[in-house]
Image (spheres, coloured by chain):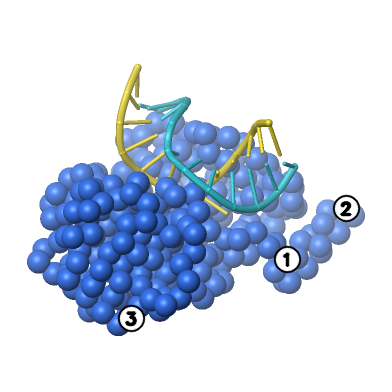
Chain colours: A blue, B cyan, C yellow
Amino acid sequence: MLRFRLQGLEAWRVQHGEEHEEARMAEVPEVETITRDLRSAVVGRTIEHVEVLNAAAVRFPSPAEFAELLRGRRVEGAERRAKYILLPLSEHLLLAVHFMLWGTLTLTPTAAARPAETLIVWRLDNDQELRLLDTLAYARAAVGAPHELAARLDLDSLGPEALDPDFNVAVLSRQLAKRRGPLKTVLLNQRVLAGLGNRDADESLWVACIDPRRIPATLTPDELQQLHDAICTVLEEGLALRGTQRDLFGVQGKAKHRRNVFERTGRPCPRCATPIEHLRIGNRNTHFCPHCQH
DNA sequence: CGCTACCTGGGT
DNA sequence: ACCCAGGTAGCG
């Protein structure tokens, strides 16, 4: 009876968008959404001026060199690798941006007020500014020749992309076979598989009905297939809804209320109504259903 | 592999 | 006055 009432209340809350916490998570659906926006609105533009408001936000080279190198470059493309946004520029330079926990990019008229959490501003040739924002100030950018950037960010060590059409159960099995430690921790390692953040890892394991504490080597072929399918479903749905946060233009994504377990401790599992449990695994918050995840 | 630091605003 | 955060680098 209590469970039934909680379910009803939960449904009402979700329907009315009553969970008012500001979404600021930067996982792959959010990063990919912004990358696509950059492709449509920033590729082809020229960077006229760069302002580094927080020197720590530039990983390399120095903030002054960073600004000088970027001035006058044309943006030639916009790609994503794991949670890095990579912008190829004219004259064979590559700009990398990482949101870390809460970072984001916005594209706004130059005249628009700058939020206090602005770390870097790229003024474009159309009276618009690309801005890197982050209240936590962990987000980072770097620029260099492609090979140098790839070496310093260790991009070649990243695992296969979960959103790549070539990602299949054989790839997942091969990547997991090497690793020890709990499945949750292994799935968060971008060198194993590029694509899952803390939320999407918990959601994928729930969809696949697999306990996050399982050791990867013990997964059966069926479980590996379920996990592969779950990861694809979670990421593709999140991306189709344009993520949980605002896009490059400030439009709110629609995936905000699609969580089954993440940050839903004590609330009923949508499959079996058992209260969702919370654990720390590898120092990360982990949420799962103790009844249907084995 | 497992742990801490990084940093600020919001929640308890 | 604490404590904590969707990620990663860098240490032992």
Residue A120 showing in the rendered view: yes
Q: Residues within 10 Å of mark 1 (few under 14, many from 20)?
A: few
Mark 1 and mark 2: Cα distance apart in space: 21 Å
The image shows residue A279, relative to residue A112, as above or below, that is: above
Q: Which residue is mark 1?
A: A18
Task: Using residue A79 as the reference point, say whether residue A270 is left or right of it.
Answer: right
SS assignment at label 3:
loop
Q: Chain of mark 3?
A: A
Locate residue A180 relative to residue A11 in the image: left or right.
Answer: left
Q: Position of residue A265 (x, y in %)?
A: 69, 46
**Pointer 2 indicates a residue of which chain?**
A
Host chain of mark 1: A
User: Do marks 1 and 3 both belong to one polypeptide chain?
Assistant: yes
Task: Residue under label 3, please give it.
Answer: A127
Q: Amino acid at mark 3?
A: Asp
Amino acid type, mark 2: Leu
Which one is earlier in the sequence, the residue at label 1 or at label 2?
Answer: 2
Q: CA distance from mark 1 to mark 3?
A: 37 Å
Q: Residues within 10 Å of mark 2 (few under 14, many from 20)?
A: few
Front one among A279 and A228: A279
Secondary element type, mark 2: helix
Q: What residue sits right under mark 2 in the picture? A: A2
The answer for how far apart the CA atoms under marks 3 and 2 are is 56 Å
Q: Is residue A219 above or below residue A270?
A: above
The total of numbered circles placed on residues is 3
Left or right: A202, with A131 as reference point: right
Q: Residue at x 20, y 48 (%)?
A: A61
* Residue A239 in view here: no
